[in-house]
Image: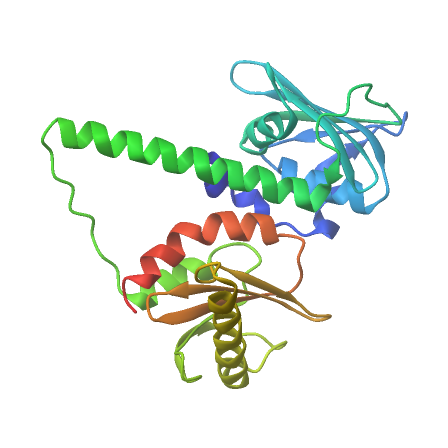
Amino acid sequence: MPLASREGLAMTQQSVPTLIHEQPDNSLKGNLSLTNVTNLLQFLAMSSKKGVIELVRYPGNEEGRIYFVGEELVSAQSGVLTGIEGFADLLSWEQGTFHFLPDIACIDKTIGLNVQHAILEAVTLLDHQANEKAMSQNSEVEERGFSMEPTERDSSEVMNSLLEVPGVDAVVVVGRDGFVIESAGSSSRVNIEELGASLAHSINGIEEMGGELNVNNFQDMFIEYGRAVIMCRPVGDAVAAIITPDASKLGVIRHKTKKLFVELGQSF
C-alpha cells in the first residue's frame, strides 16, 4: 500500500518546516515528495494552526482538502470521498503538492476528531482495505490454479525490518516467563532486560482480565510514558514490544508494523 512505502515519514516535527515554504500571506506550500500529509498535518496542528490544506496529486491532478482547527480534524475530501474515507485516501498520496491556507473554515463537519485519533482511524481503514485487496488477489491466484510459496525469513531479519520503520528505536521479544528471547536495536530510554519481566507480568494480568470479562485474548497494547512509548503485540507464544520516543508517529508505526508482527509470529 502506498502509505507503507513512504520514506518521508521519518521526519520529525522540527524537520518539516525546512521542506515547506512560507508565503508573504502566511500560507505554506510544498511538495509531497519531500514530506507527507501525516507529518504536515501533525506539525500544523501542534503549532495551533487552523485553516485548510489544499492538495493536488500527481499524476492525474486529483484534488483534496483537509480542514482543521488546532488539534481537531474537522473535515476532509478527496474527490468524491469525504470524512475518514476521504482522509484515508489523502494519507496514501505520495506525489503532488500542498498549499496550507490559514483561517479558512469549513461549513460541513464530516470528521470532528482529534488529529491523532483521526490518523489512527484512517490507518485502520487502510489496513482493512489492504486486507480485502490481498484476499481478492489470493482468490484470483487460487482460481487460476497457481500455488504461491512465500519465502520465509528468520526472526532476526524480520526484527531488522521492524527497526527500519521510522520512529522505532528497539524491538524485543519476551517469553511469557519474562525472559527476553531476542532483541534488536537499542534504546537509552528503557532497560531491555527489566522490560522483559515487567512486560510479561503486565500482559499476563491483562489476559487474565480479558478471560474474566470474556472479551477474548488481547490484540495490542500501547503504554505512553514521559520518555518513551511502548507498543506490544502477541507473536506466537511470545510478546513483541516496540520502543519509540513519543506518540507522534504511533499511527504510522502501527500501520507499517502490522504485517511484520504477523511474520514475526511464525518464528515463535
Q: Quadrant of residue 71?
A: top right
Would residue 38 be found to the left or right of residue 143 on screen? right
* Extreme residue in the left direction: 145
Q: Residue 7, position in %: x, y?
A: 52, 44
Compare residues 113 and 154 and report the one nearer the observer. 113
Compare residues 129 and 206 and report the one nearer the observer. 206
Q: Would residue 1 be seen by someone viewing this image from the given angle?
A: no
Position of residue 193 relative to residue 232, above or below, is below
Q: Quadrant of residue 265?
A: bottom left
Q: Residue 69, position in %: x, y?
A: 83, 35
Q: Quadrant of the C terminus?
A: bottom left
- The residue under the point 40% across, 84% down is 177
- The residue under the point 35% across, 56% down is 262
- The residue under the point 33% across, 66% down is 236
Would residue 147 be found to the left or right of residue 264 on screen? left
Position of residue 245 relative to residue 194, above or below, is above
Q: Residue 76, position in %: x, y?
A: 68, 25
The structure's colour scheme is rainbow
